[in-house]
Amino acid sequence: MERKWWHSLTAYQVYPRSFYDSNGDGIGDIKGITQKLDYLKELGIGIIWLSPVYKSPNDDNGYDISDYYDIMDEFGTMADMEELIAEAAKRGIRIVMDLVVNHTSDEHKWFVDARASKNSRYRDYYIWADPVNGGPPTDMPSSWSDSAWEYDKESGQYYFHMFSVKQADLNWENPDMRSDIYDMMNFWIDKGIGGFRMDVIEMIGKKPFEGIINNGPMLHEYLREMNERTFGAHDLLTVGECWNADTEIAKLYSAPERHELSMVFQFEHICLKGDKWYPKPYRVRDLKRVFSKWQKALHNKGWNSLFWCNHDLPRAVSAFGNDKEYREESAKMLATLLHGMQGTPYIYQGEELGMTNIRLGSIEDYRDIESINMYNDRIAKGDKEEDIMESIYQSGRDNARTPMQWSAEQYGGFSKVQPWIAVNENYREINAAAQTNDETSVFSHYKRLVALRRSSDTIVYGDFRLVNESDDDFFAYERSYNGETILVVCNTTPENREFVYRGVAGSELLIGSRQDADISDGSIKLRPYEAVILKLA
């Protein structure tokens, strides 16, 4: 496989509204990100995935864009954005912009003009249909339960939206619309960005009248055209959000010879927990099966993205670890498990500190439109409020969106004033200031993992072999490259466990979550949630 700059680097997702408030209005901003670049450099980060900072009315926290060429007032100015790109570059960090082109805000000039007249040149930039029997043209629901069709009184037609009614879906069958999107992408490429994370990109080939939303027949043709007319001429990272991708579909996206994307975010390991609002326990053997499948299927044929959480998912240590008695231990174990595999790892802000889910007092304290819509929908159906709130506590998106915990100061050092959403009460114990100079901290463990990837071809390019597939106590695997073998062993339980492995004697401890390891001839004794990375003799 041709080596790429993003193969050995680690990415870090910044959710701007909650990262750092530089101007004292309770909302994170671009200058705040710039001020914290040295923190990310210290962690070893080479890529920032920046959630949307474009102009937006904020119906869905910036994923409803009203102007792709401007910056949200709350976040700053285009000059601030240019400064961030330049200052990040000085530190060897590239900015990957969030590309949201499945839909725009209903306040985008295209939609405003399209709505005003059926003769607008922008009318066909969106998907419109006449009523059928006095109602929507199809019975397709949106991703948030309501109808995917919204009636527009002025024109007497419905427009299509897979998300909020204020997020009108673009019509990718229109070549003029595609050209305008490509012009916008090239505008940002010319600013010096490092690539794009593509929001729900699998939806752009939709055929709503045929019931097809994901993986439509023209999807990959659109992506090849996009590649040719925008980032294909540049050495950029591109990653598509693809909830419905399997390994074969992922190869279509990421096989280098197809000239589409660098990689995709796939969510099969997330889906092991079942329905979002009614999650179930998962078995470690199933987690191993999923990760192993993806590691083997894409080896030398595509590229994996590696992640536990993001702005749409609960906190990693709360979802997959033990965020009570063994928060630090399980956070380090989860990091080790993921960062030893092949692919580009993505750390979500605060994950490197072991930040946890939050339990706010009532639905009025939440800000996420998805959680609020779900709450109202289930209340209307007669569900008990305590059951609904428990769903939000476990799975709501605001778990990931609470302010970054920088210090033990008021509001976690995020702001000098009350933030836009509450800070988790555990900020006094869990914060960056307490961890950055502590060699035993979760932060320092992540830092070592990030550094190992930069220095180890075996971690970046090696073969993957799962060890003890059916075991539910350990997640263990080998990585082999050019005669070197690295063994990763993670105790996934709150108990002391012994891992039997012939030939472990004389191995070199590259990274240990406890700074030491009890290794003897033929076995490794691991404490609760302990993890090690060994270079075999």
Image (spheres, rainbow, N blue to C red):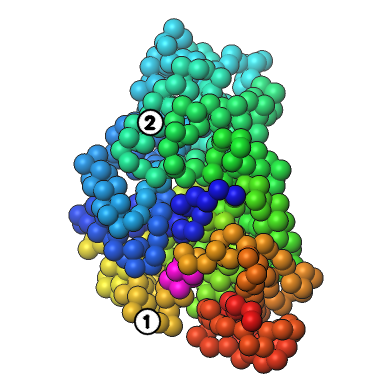
Majority SS type along the magenta span: helix
Q: Residue at label 2?
A: 186
When the figure is inspected, residue 251 is found, relative to residue 271, above or below; the finding is above
Badge 2 element? helix
Badge 1 element? loop
Residue 465: percent from left, percent from top: 71, 66
Residue 343: percent from left, percent from top: 57, 56
Residues packed near mark 1 inside 10 Å, few (<14), some (14 to 19) or many (20 plus): few
Q: Can see residue 336?
A: yes
Residue 133: percent from left, percent from top: 66, 15
Residue type, label 2:
Asn
Q: Residue at label 1?
A: 438
Viewer-side residue, 108 vs 3: 3
Between marks 2 and 1 in the image, the one whose residue lies nearer the viewer: 2
Q: Is the residue under label 1 in contact with that under label 2 (CB below 8 Å)?
A: no
Residue extent of the magenta highlight: 447-452
Residue type, label 1:
Asp
Q: Can see residue 390?
A: no
When the figure is inspected, residue 400 is found, relative to residue 231, above or below; the finding is below
